[in-house]
Image (tube, rainbow, N blue to C red):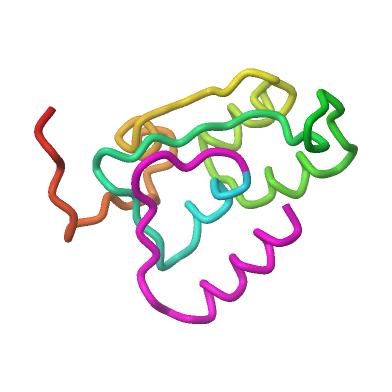
Amino acid sequence: MLEMVKRREELARSGKTVRIRGYCRSACTILTTLPNACLGPNARIGFHAPRIPNTTIIPPYVDQIMGSYYRAGIRDRWFGGWNRSLNMNVITAREYVRLDPQTQICKSIKPSRR
């Protein structure tokens, strides 16, 4: 998690567009609120409790650090139980934007037809 916080700071300073595509789960979810980030139209975002690798142990404070990067309905859901869930809670890019309207869908990525 700390490495992702560091990477987030680097990406924010870069000013380059950060396109979150495919399946973003776990620590990468803190990138979604970068001012220079957008979600690919087919992206899926997964949330679960932060854990010590290869255990079910949820370390103290890490969920608070992660939650500090979320906004609106995403933050509400995070602190409403996703932060304690050992199961992955996956939402689509469109659902993410519905819960956090400040988030943008990338305009330069065309959705694939499925």
Whether residue 102 sits left or right of residue 88 in the image: it is: left
- Quadrant placement of the C terminus: top left
Q: Residue at x 81, y 23 (%)?
A: 56
Q: Residue at x 80, y 44 (%)?
A: 62
Determine whether 81 is above or below 97 in the image. above
Whether residue 66 sits left or right of residue 22 in the image: it is: right
Determine whether 20 is above or below 35 in the image. above
In the rendered image, residue 92, in percent from the top left (x then y), is placed at 35, 31
- Residue lying at the far front of the rendered structure: 54
Whether residue 97 sits left or right of residue 48 in the image: it is: left
In the rendered image, residue 54, in percent from the top left (x then y), is placed at 78, 31
In the rendered image, residue 63, in percent from the top left (x then y), is placed at 76, 39
- The stretch in magenta equals 1-26
Determine whether 104 is above or below 16 in the image. above
- Exactly how many numbered labels are in the figure? 0
Q: Residue at x 62, y 52 (%)?
A: 69
Q: Is residue 3 found inside the magenta-colored segment of the image? A: yes
- Residue lying at the far left of the rendered structure: 113
Whether residue 70 sits left or right of residue 49 in the image: it is: left
